[in-house]
Image (cartoon, grey):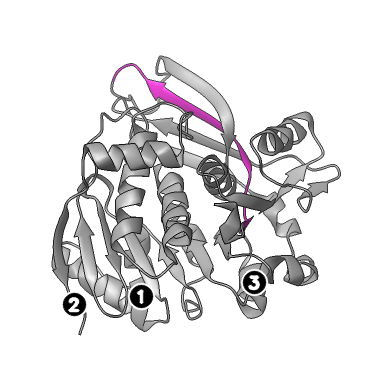
Amino acid sequence: MEEKGYAVVIGAANIDIGGTPYKPLIPGDSNPGVIKMSYGGVGRNIAHNLALLGVRVEFITAIGDDTLGKEMLERCESIGMDTSLSLIVPEASTSTYLFINDDDGEMSLALSHVDIVKHITPEYIESLSDVINSAAVVIADCNLTQETFLKIKEICKVPLYMDTVSVSQADKIKGHLDGIDTLKPNLLEAEFLTDMIIETDYDCLEAAKALIDQGVRRVFISLGPNGMIAADKDHTLMADRYPADVKCTTGAGDSAMAAIIWSSLKDGGDGLEAPVKAANAAASATISVDPTIHPAMSSELIEKMLDDHEVVIKEVRYIK
């Protein structure tokens, strides 16, 4: 993949603390279960998956001047990410993401403290314009401030991919979607960005069209257990989810985004079918394990999964 150039990923890097109960959650009570700590953050997870898929990654984030943050950057470097342009903020704490799953592994509640990414300022982004525009692709997550996102969009001359992160964070890009090459929201985020209620497949197709009408070149809407919709100005694809035994859904969207980027770099960046199939396979692999990053994630894993079980494209419908 290195001959295709490198990817710049700009976004959050968190310490993830997550728990899964042994039995159905009882609100307001102490629930016995398993608690684990790992490295996370949407930007960091995407960068980690990309590195495992063989893409050269320049990862730009902000961490606190603390032991956990420094250990996290060392881990990023150990798997091949370049973090030399990331910021270490004195007397600050590294971001933390706290989540509780239900007993089926589906996220029930989460709390995210990522204020430190405010130190990735528009001025800092402008100082990196040569690095950004020498990349094959730039990926940003919505944990960044709106001002920083707008600066990235202003100076970026290469394809810009955006991950919406959550409904609350997606507010920063609402009304500012023009110039985004590829957007990956989930169903709730797509509703928010389009001011639509999505209840049917037709509604989802209309939401995809609305996002493209706002200036996005390609959109991949994650439908969770129902797969993914991919669309550009000419057509839409509805792809089934790759089958999986669900253990933990956290991180699935990040691996899907990484697979979209990996597949697009490999195939030239214009299609929908190969990226949506790769995204569904990567997400399926991720939710089948407890860690937010599949330990065996690789291009070989995705290709083998697709050889073993082809992701079904349910229909193609052109957007008028």
First to last magenta residue range = 7-23
Residue 15: percent from the left, percent from the top? 62, 35
**Contact flag, marks 3 and 1 (Cβ < 8 Å):** no
In three-dimensional space, the C-alpha distance between marks 1 and 2, rounded to whole angstroms, equals: 15 Å
Q: Secondary structure at mark 2?
A: loop
Q: Is tag 3's residue or tag 1's residue first in the polypeptide sequence? A: 3
At label 3, counting other C-alpha atoms closer than 10 Å, the crowd grade (few under 14, some 14-19, many 20 or more) is: many
Location of residue 33 with respect to 14 vertically, above or below: above
Q: Main secondary structure of the magenta part?
A: strand
In three-dimensional space, the C-alpha distance between marks 3 and 2, rounded to whole angstroms, equals: 31 Å
Residue 13 belongs to the span the image colors magenta: yes
The amino acid marked with disc number 2 is Tyr
The amino acid marked with disc number 1 is Leu
Looking at the rendered image, the quarter that the C terminus falls into is bottom left
In three-dimensional space, the C-alpha distance between marks 3 and 1, rounded to whole angstroms, equals: 19 Å
The answer to whether any part of residue 102 appears in the image is: yes
Q: Secondary structure at mark 1?
A: helix
The answer to whether 90 appears left or right of 269 in the picture is right
Residue 132: percent from the left, percent from the top? 68, 67
At label 2, counting other C-alpha atoms closer than 10 Å, the crowd grade (few under 14, some 14-19, many 20 or more) is: some
Q: At 34% across and 30% down in the image, what residue appears?
A: 288
Q: Closer to us: mark 3 or mark 2? A: 2
Task: Specify the farthest residue to the right.
Answer: 90
Q: Is tag 3's residue or tag 2's residue first in the polypeptide sequence? A: 3
Q: Which mark is residue 318?
A: 2
At label 1, counting other C-alpha atoms closer than 10 Å, the crowd grade (few under 14, some 14-19, many 20 or more) is: many
Residue 237: percent from the left, percent from the top? 22, 64
The answer to whether 267 appears left or right of 76 in the picture is left
Identify the residue under disc 3: 152
Identify the residue under disc 1: 211
